[in-house]
Image (tube, helix red, strand yellow):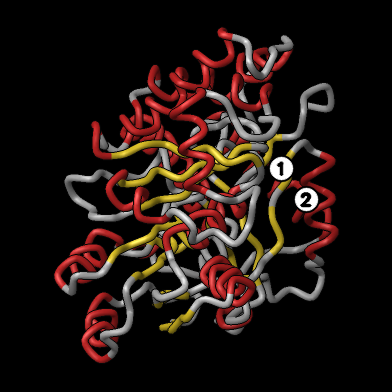
């Protein structure tokens, strides 16, 4: 294990395959015909993943996933528009922060981090405020790991004649989001999540008819989604230097995604990882924050144990020494930590992690992972 890179049980960046890593071992010119062909291929493959056909296009954006989300909001929400932001975690709050910077009119509906967005409340809000033109929601809110009902939300938004924008950062490629079942104008994601590429590229899948109307909305040169799209369509080139090695690796990751069976195959492996993880952690006494019906198979939040001998930093370091990296908590509703189920990992790695977790707990003298609300039972 010490000779292997650590297994990243996080929501991304995450463990990648050797072949994805090897794809970065070559240099490409950003205007070279070979790289241009790879980039064009990558853009089409992403549209194919949502069944977008000729109605959608991929606009890649240099940077992390948040760059893509900011480009989406800054492009699709114009100065005369109003955005309703559905918040049940840190990434919904981040969208609100972006709109503050852009001085866009917003309204928010907020739920606790352990509760999903309620489509009925969205319907009421849209009926009460006719000024709202767009709605933004996070598909899988990795603050807790909760899955929001985007199909139901999209139906409510469409029936109200409004436009939906989706942050599908942690779900895209593993959980279905298809234009035939979810109506949206744009969805943002990135290279280093469920497609299992490396960090450096965000992208927005855009309904072309809606994207055409965004000209002049952007308040950032580098994050101007419309201009990025226009330049790619006219010249096949990026306006500014692209993360070439990341893009080539991402195209390789898309090939491996396809070979695994696409969204169904990738999501199936993650669901199996999730089951092994949750069953194993519960056997050690740990409790999940969310009930199974609300949990996405992306990242799982666990309550901190009640045992005073449990110190998260020591638990974290012990796992890292054994080759596993997990994630601290990000909740306000509970003291917690998170473990991811995504990346180039499977049954063998998940079972090895559980064995390592048990070993670390034994070393700390922690008899059970039971949280405070179960400590007296």
| Residue at 52% over, 43% down | 227
Left or right of residue 177: residue 101 = right
| Residue 287 appears in the figure | no
* Front residue of 73 and 139: 73
Q: Crowding near pointer 2: few (<14 within 10 Å), some, many (20+)?
A: many
Q: Mark 2 points at which residue?
A: 360
| Residue at 65% over, 27% down | 246
Residue 168 point in image, percent of width and height: 44, 52
Q: Is mark 1 on a helix, strand or loop?
A: helix
Task: Using the image, tell me which numbered label, if any, was put on residue 72.
Answer: none
Q: Do the residues labelled 1 and 2 touch (CB within 8 Å)?
A: yes
Quadrant in the picture for the C terminus: bottom right
Quadrant in the picture for the N terminus: top right
Residue 265 point in image, percent of width and height: 35, 29
Residue 238 point in image, percent of width and height: 59, 30
Q: In this view, does 93 lie above or below 52?
A: below
Residue 299 point in image, percent of width and height: 53, 53
Q: Is mark 2 on a helix, strand or loop?
A: helix
Q: In this view, does 128 lie above or below 2?
A: below
| Residue at 69% over, 50% down | 326
| Residue 102 appears in the figure | yes
Q: Mark 1 points at which residue?
A: 356
| Residue at 62% over, 45% down | 12
Left or right of residue 295: residue 284 = right
């Amino acid at each position: 294990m010490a000779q292997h890179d650590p297994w990243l049980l996080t929501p991304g960046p995450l463990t990648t395959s050797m072949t994805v890593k090897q794809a970065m071992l070559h240099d490409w010119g950003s205007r070279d015909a070979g790289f241009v062909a790879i980039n064009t291929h990558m853009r089409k493959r992403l549209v194919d993943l949502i069944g977008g056909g000729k109605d959608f296009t991929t606009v890649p954006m240099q940077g992390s996933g948040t760059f893509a989300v900011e480009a989406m909001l800054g492009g699709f929400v114009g100065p005369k528009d109003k955005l309703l932001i559905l918040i049940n975690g840190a990434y919904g709050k981040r969208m609100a922060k972006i709109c503050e910077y852009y001085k866009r009119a917003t309204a928010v509906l907020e739920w606790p981090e352990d509760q999903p967005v309620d489509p009925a409340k969205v319907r009421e809000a849209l009926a009460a405020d006719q000024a709202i033109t767009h709605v933004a929601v996070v598909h899988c809110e990795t603050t807790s790991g909760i899955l929001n009902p985007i199909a139901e939300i999209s139906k409510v938004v469409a029936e109200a004649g409004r436009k939906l924008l989706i942050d599908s950062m942690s779900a895209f490629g593993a959980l279905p989001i298809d234009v035939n079942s979810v109506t949206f104008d744009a969805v943002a994601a990135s290279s280093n999540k469920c497609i299992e590429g490396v960090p450096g590229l965000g992208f927005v899948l855009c309904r072309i008819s809606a994207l055409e109307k965004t000209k002049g909305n952007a308040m950032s040169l580098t994050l101007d989604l419309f201009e990025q799209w226009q330049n790619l369509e006219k010249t096949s080139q990026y306006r500014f230097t692209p993360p070439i090695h990341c893009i080539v690796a991402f195209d390789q990751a898309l090939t491996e995604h396809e070979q695994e069976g696409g969204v169904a195959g990738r999501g199936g492996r993650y669901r199996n990882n999730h089951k092994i993880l949750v069953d194993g952690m519960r056997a050690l006494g740990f409790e999940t924050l969310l009930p199974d019906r609300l949990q996405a198979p992306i990242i799982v939040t666990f309550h901190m144990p009640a045992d005073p001998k449990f110190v998260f930093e020591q638990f974290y370091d012990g796992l890292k020494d054994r080759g596993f990296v997990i994630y601290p908590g990000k909740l306000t509703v509970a003291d917690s930590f998170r473990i991811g189920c995504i990346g180039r990992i499977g049954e063998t790695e998940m079972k090895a992690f559980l064995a390592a977790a048990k070993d670390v707990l034994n070393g700390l003298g922690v008899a059970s992972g039971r949280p405070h609300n179960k400590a007296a039972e």
